[in-house]
Amino acid sequence: MKHSKCVNSEYKTCESSLCCTKINNFGVKRSGTEILKNVNLHIHCGDLTAIIGPNGAGKSTLLKAILGEITHSGELQFLDANNGTTRPSMGYVPQKLDLDSSSPTSVLDLFAAAHTNLPIWFRYPKKIRERVQKSLSRTHGEHLINKRLGDLSGGELQRVLLALALDPIPNLLLLDEPVSGIDQNGLELFYQTVSMLRKNYDLSIILVSHDLNLIAEYADRVAFVNNHTIECCGTPQEVFSNEKVIQTFGLDWSSRFQKVEKDRVANAFMV
Ligand SMILES: Nc1ncnc2c1ncn2[C@@H]1O[C@H](COP(=O)(O)OP(=O)(O)OP(=O)(O)O)[C@@H](O)[C@H]1O
């Protein structure tokens, strides 16, 4: 079988898009141990880039380094055709959140705390409630506004955190997919929402993911993190037919992609 040759991180030239984020030569050491080295990645506006890799490969570490939450070497650039080179604004949804499930804090309180200096025993101005309602509608979570955070299901909490990360709309959205607490339907809905958001807002999205089926369906690009670096990057089809990826996940996806391509051609003739 012929495997695709993946080139570390480069897949499009920045000139082809109005903006892009460049991760240049990132390295991370924690407690004296090298977690990541020579990580290079270019993300274009409107692209959903999935980060995959085995457990402990450094996927969450990469997101935290991009956020500036942990120290790293290398640099992050945001190139915007209109504004030149700047630092991108970022939204982030973590993999897990340690919530006190007995706390009376509501979804509205959470947003108000992020957007105002008002103590939570104050009655919120109407415009705050309207802004939160609008934010939640982006992820189909309007009905959750008065719910206690501790009462939200895994999928509902994910929708609330996604809405919060999108207010205001960032240049770069970083999502660490939860590995527990969300069922398959909830995950599918999450991917559909993310996919729709990137189109509507021309957002650059980096998503750490464990669900290869959903990535194959929704991601524009995939980066495979292994042995402390990005070993392979390209379209889902390119990455899933790479030998190292097949070995790591024990899967051969080439027949699946041939079927997807056959269905696409068949559908095109039926129109
Ligand atoms: N604060 C820390 N100090 C030292 N090592 C750490 C620290 N945080 C994480 N690590 C190590 O860094 C490596 C990468 O962790 P990370 O959480 O980024 O992996 P991951 O690819 O996101 O894993 P998973 O798929 O299991 O979520 C792991 O070996 C982890 O033990």
Image (cartoon, rainbow, N blue to C red):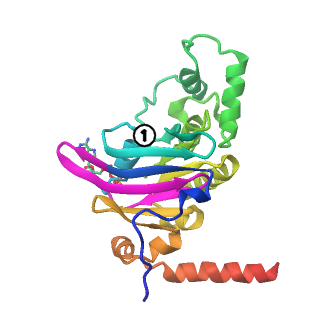
Q: Judge whether 206 appears above or below 3 on screen.
A: above
Region rendered in magenta: 27-56
Report if residue 185 is visible in the image.
no
User: Residue 132: x and y, percent?
Assistant: 66, 29
Q: Quadrant of the C terminus?
A: bottom right
What's the residue at 44%, 79% (across, down)? 4
Circle 1 — which element?
helix
Residue marked by disc 1: 67
Q: Judge whether 165 appears above or below 213 on screen.
A: above
Q: 245 and 5: which one is in front?
A: 5
Q: Residues within 10 Å of mark 1 (few under 14, many from 20)?
A: some
User: Residue 129: x and y, percent?
Assistant: 69, 23
**Magenta stretch contains residue 51:** yes
Q: Which corner quadrant of the image does residue 127 belong to?
A: top right
User: Residue 105: x and y, percent?
Assistant: 52, 23
Q: Quadrant of the N terminus?
A: bottom left
Q: Judge whether 68 appears above or below 132 on screen.
A: below
> Seen in the image, is 65 located left or right of residue 79?
left
Q: 51 and 16: which one is in front?
A: 16
User: Residue 203: x and y, percent?
Assistant: 61, 48
